[in-house]
Amino acid sequence: MIGVIFDGRDLRNLWPLTENKSILLRILGNKRVIEHLFDLFERLRMDNLVVITKDRKIWEQCREMARVFLVGDEIEALYKLLQVDDDFLLVESNTFFDLDGLDFERLKEKAMFLFRDYKIDAYSYFNKIAVEKDRGDFKKFSLSGIYHFPFKITKRLEEEIFKSFDEFLISGLEEMPLKVIRGVIKRIEYPWDYLDANMYMLWKLKYFVGDNCDIWDEAKIKKPVIINENCVIKNAVLEKAVIDKNCLVGEFSCVKRSVINEGTSIPHHNYLVDSIVGSSCNFGTSSNIATYKFDGSEVKMVIEGKKRGIGRNKFGAIIGDNVQLGPNVTIYPGKRIGNNVWIDGNILIKRDIESNKFVRLKFEDGYEILEK
């Protein structure tokens, strides 16, 4: 049987985290997401692996460990999937598993799906989901987990044309006799899901420090904390923080319940809580992220073009890669900053900023947004 990591889906709701980089390359605790999935297949004793992706960096980094198919869009990815020449076990790139929480013997129990006119055996594992026949959220159920597709079925499905990978999995789903399946799984569909998955890894690992880190004696570290290799932590405060490799958290900065990706500098007098910061970013002096509204109401974000609540009243910002903040920048709760953005000093950000922009201060009426 072949193990397949499917990275062909357009994860637009995770913007800007997946605009320039696959979710597979983002940090999740002390490893990349793709490393967790490779570990999963190793535990299943499967060494014949395929990765279907749109990210050339995945091809460059993983081609010695797996067959990597580089595709242009979701439809091409689906057809590559159907060309796999054996039974295959499918895992989506934005599905997180806690390997220690999985019962690998029970994983082999089969759930029967009726897929149009074909029956498909699907190995599945879920967390906090209970589904009975003719009841429950079938879409949520069917789009999370591990799937086993027999080769004879996939060859017949080549004749079908599907609008999306969602439809590939759920179209014609009429029967689900499996009542309850339990496991530890997190579908990373929105930015706060990625943050929650990292908070779970913090709870699990408690305290991890990678090689070649310089942690000052004056640093205040309240566990759980994960600090990956080659980081410098000065007299800063860390609490429930995941710090990727090659990062700096400097004097009098505070990082709580947040994820900082590779090569980012939080140098001095910065405050980050309930936030996600991409790779190769730099915060100017006293630049901060707000997390809480005056009235304590639910934080809202623009999702699929509409402003919607995210189910929590404390949430900071999502900042993409290669973002430069000037001094004294403040970002309102629930705002997203795209990739390759520069923000001038002394600016209050109250709206999302698209990628490749320069936000410049205008003393007479706030600020203007320019193309870089």
Image (cartoon, rainbow, N blue to C red):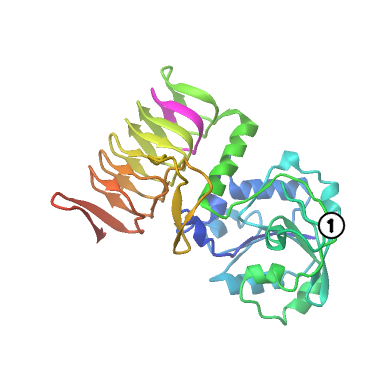
> Residue at the left extreme?
364
Q: Could you say whether the residue bearing mark 1 is in a helix, strand or loop?
A: loop
User: Residue 290's spot in the image, x, y percent?
Assistant: 37, 40
Reading the image, the residue beneath label 1 is: 178
Classify residue 339 as left or right of residue 175: left
Read off the magenta span. Answer: 232-245
> In the image, what residue occupies the spot 68% across and 59% down?
140
How far from the left and from the top, in percent, is residue 13? 51, 59
Q: Which residue lies at the image location 74% right of the left edge and 58% below the top edge? A: 136
Q: Is residue 228 visible?
A: yes
**Image spot of residue 210 (x, y percent):** 54, 31
Q: What residue do we see at 81% from left, 43% from top?
A: 103
Q: Quadrant of the C terminus?
A: bottom left
Q: What type of secondary structure mainly makes up the magenta span?
A: strand
- Give the tally of numbered discs: 1
- Viewport quadrant of the N terminus: bottom right
- The residue sitting at the top extreme is 217
Residue 316 coordinates in the image, percent (x, y):
43, 43
At horizontal 17% and vertical 53% (from top left) the residue drawn is: 365
User: In the image as oriented, which residue stretches furthest toward the bottom?
Assistant: 159
- Where is 235 relative to 161, above or below? above
Considering only vertical position in the picture, is 189 above or below 219? Answer: below
